[in-house]
Amino acid sequence: MDEESFSYRPRIVDSALKRKLRGKGAVLIEGPKWCGKTTTAEQVSKSTLSVDDPSTVNTNKILSEIDPERLLTGDHPRLLDEWQVAPKLWDAVRHHVDRHKGHGQFILTGSSVPADISETIHSGTGRFGWLVMRPMSLYESGDSTGDVSLASLFESQPISGCSNLDLDRLTFLICRGGWPESVDMDDDVALDQAFDYIDAVIRNDMSRVDNIRRDPQKVRMLLRSYARNQGTQISQASISADISSNDTEGVSEETVSEYLQALRKLYVIEDMKAWNPNLRSKTAIRTSDTRYFVDPSLAAASLRIGPQDLINNLNTTGFFFEALAVRDLRVYAESLDGDVYHYKDNLDNECDVVIHLRDGRYALLEVKLGGERLIDEGVRTLKDVLRRIDTDKMGKPAFMAIITGTERYAYRRDDGIIILPLGALKN
């Protein structure tokens, strides 16, 4: 797509960025490469410095050490794109904001954590606002009708809406992912993008992120194992054992731990924290993180599979659909000052997604691809989990819902549980 045909697709984070610029001297936008951070920041910035521009990157690094103010000179808000390439810029921005009072002076974007985080001397508390960007949700890419908003569900408003997604389209969207540039590509070309992304992570990014050389073959094996086990609480030791049982060359638990940390720095993986509510009994809550990629397309690419492979194995499709739903729910929930968690206790009562808002309201959600049997299973799970929660202390959930993939209509059942197609949802 050429520049003349480019049209910016609004992002849910747009309003949060503008709000934070009104209250902070600088705003840091973090997230994976190619998710749209720079383009989003450019919509409100008045000048830009591409810190990693190959023609100036060495000069930028030197200036950040000896005369950083030169790099900060420009109309505000000034965008410092890929700032982590010259980590000294962090403290330079902090000092500039301290000296030149006022809000909305700088936007910093970064697709990895600095190799030497100790170089960023000060935390930036009070001067910086933080935003996380992820690949596009279905609503942002135009693949959800947006008939039902998450905000309206928390307000107990009437429910009405429908999805246009069928199984073929859903499996395509899982494998295409929410990468902004792929949204308007021809389908066959769009499906290549996640494969290229994973190949770049394996061949280059994993060694560049902190200047530590890593074995590409071990990275590939680790990504495959992670993809096979997405949506579970698999331990690092079990990942090591899984690799050893599926590949001729094993990977030690220590290596797994170190490689996973590098993948987190690159925002390739983003695990889900466990929810810890007040319970009616002394049942122990499992606190292990649930494993996810930042976008389900990266899991598909790690396994080298496409839409037809998912259609041929609907059990696997269910896990990938759950990952797609988690990606979207994270985007929607954060715009409402909410966080997304997973619940599981030692009696194996489990809830796929818990959305907990800053004001204390929460919702319980199960994710099911579709079909009466799976939906009934999800309903039973929600009711079992609710019985475990001490609602005298926690309050009742604002709503409970089954997030579906192939169901067409959104509606509230007689028992109050909502059937909600992901293809009808927005923030």
Image (cartoon, rainbow, N blue to C red):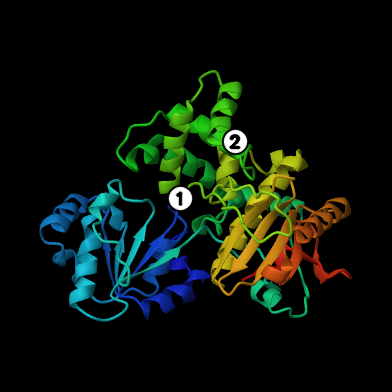
Q: Nearer the viewer, residue 351 or 270?
A: 351
Asked whether residue 422 appears in the rendered view, the answer is: no
Q: Nearer the viewer, residue 371 or 180?
A: 371
Q: Residue at x 73, y 78 (%)?
A: 156
Tell me the amino acid under the disc marked 1.
Tyr
Q: Residue at x 77, y 76 (%)?
A: 159
Q: Earlier in the sequence, mark 1 or mark 2?
A: 1
Quarter location, residue 209: top left
Q: Residue at x 59, y 60 (%)?
A: 340
Asked whether residue 15 appears in the rendered view, the answer is: yes
Residue 190 as seen in the image, left or right of residue 20: right
Vertical relation: 108 (above or below) 84 = below
* Disc 2 secondary structure class: loop
The numbered dot on residue 267 is 1
Q: Position of residue 307 (x, y in %)?
A: 68, 44
Tell me the amino acid under the disc marked 2.
Leu
Mark 2: few/some/many CA within 10 Å (<14, 14-19, 20+) = some
